[in-house]
Amino acid sequence: MSTGTPVQFTFDADERNVPSKDSPIAELLVESDPSAIAEAANVHVRLGALEDGLPLVLSIQREKNVRDGLLRALGVSCITHLPEEVKPHLMALEETVAATRTSVGCEEVDGDLLYLSQQRVERNLVGELVGHAAQSAVLNEHGMNYEAAKKWHDSKTCTALEVKRGGRALTLRTFADGQRVVEPLQLESFSCLPTARFQVDVEAASRGRYGGYGAGGGAGDEGRPCYEGILSDTARYHAALRRGRGAARIVLSRHDFVEHVILPVAAFVHDKYHAKGQVHTLVAPSTIRLTPEGIVVDDQSASCESGAMSAAFFPSSASPEQKLGFPVETSSDVYAIGQLLLKVFKGASLYGEIKQFVVPGSEATVSLLAVAGCYIPVLEGEARKSYERFVMRCCSYEKKDRFATARELHHELSALLATHPLHSLGSFSLILPHSAAFAQCAPDAPVEIARRVVDLRSQFC
């Protein structure tokens, strides 16, 4: 699948955007201590790097006066419209605020002082690449019990920053009952996908829009000229953003998705769970994390021993025994990995008889597909037959007919991919909206300040 016509370009050394040590903004980022958040009116703190390597900067800009907010509250457009006796009090209030502008936006949580940003910084790259994020499904269907689902529905999540101890970036989830859960902020990275490429439209700035691209999509206008290259070539990527002045698309071939995502998922699940007699139970796009160290599959504390019943599941990828509340085995995870592989093939599906079951211990009715076969229209000949047989070995209705463990799946899929590569299937494409913000900065802006994706303006009033 072509997403544009590549354009060759070169760049000068100054386009690498290495921050100048003389820049006051760069100095603020490099030298500022996290504790300055509780003291300064305006501060910028680097939280880490986003998925494409561009910096994630927390930009805190606090108002130094209460005049505008107070006038708005009183419905007055100008201070001259206030009674004369009120003006001195307003000025005195402003002076007090200016002298005590500490801790605005900060709150003590479990004994630690945190700065709370109301903007969340969370993505799930695999879920967005394959066009599936299952978190909503597990909440909206009976994949979790009602109490658990309601608890998550009623929770609120924000990004936080430790003020006193180390300045770690955190995620704070607050539940309706007042419970608070603090976890490290998980920022994903394409660095574990060595073949990931970028594309930036040459005409993006003049069009004033990003074009018709989306998760799992392709080009809106075929043949559109674009800058492209390997994402790991940071200097070229930055130069392309400057030249194109628009959002970048990350492109990953479907063959490479199998090699660098699905196979590592199988290896991770076996090494961390199956080798120890455990079942992950929640293998799905929304739990797969791309980290600089490699693929991680988050079990959200729902893993269990083989032979036990799982506490939760994703309806879109769970095995039949999980949905019915029967004991799960390592082959239950194999079923979920097979469902992930199926998404690589456009138009692919399982087919068979639909069976209706009543979930034991409840009145809920579940529709299950008694799989009779697999249909993959984008392949031909022996490759098609081989991949259809493989998917059936993963997603068979009967546990005994599946691969027993993710290790067996990994071994067979590696051999199959070597025999029948999938290079002809095209690519997944994903827009990175934040890259456009970097592109719109002045060409001489230091990289460290070009990406202010978290911007909270805290007011004193």
Image: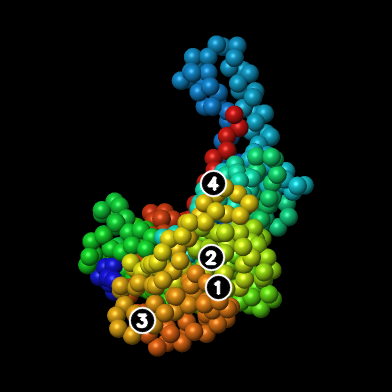
Marks 1 and 4 close (CB-CB < 8 Å): no
Q: Are marks 2 and 1 in contact (CB under 8 Å)?
A: yes
Name the residue that disc number 4 marks: 119
Q: What element does badge 2 sit on?
A: loop
Identity, as a three-letter code, of the amino acid under mark 1: Lys
Q: Is residue 153 left or right of residue 36?
A: left
**First in sequence: mark 4 vs mark 3:** 4
Q: Secondary structure at mark 4?
A: loop
Distance between mark 4 and mark 3 Cα atoms: 48 Å
Q: Which amino acid type is shown beneath numbered disc 3?
A: Lys
Residue 201 placement (x, y as % from top left): 30, 62
Quadrant of the image occupied by residue 326: bottom right
Q: Which residue is mark 1?
A: 399
Q: CA distance from mark 2 to mark 3?
A: 23 Å
- Marks 3 and 1, how far apart in space? 22 Å
Quadrant occupied by the N terminus: bottom left
Q: Amino acid at mark 4?
A: Gln
Mark 1 or mark 4: which is in front? Answer: 1
Q: Of circles 2 and 4, which is in front? A: 2
Query: How far from the left and from the top, in percent, is residue 269?
Result: 60, 73
Query: Where does label 3 land, which residue?
Result: 385
Chosen colour scheme: rainbow
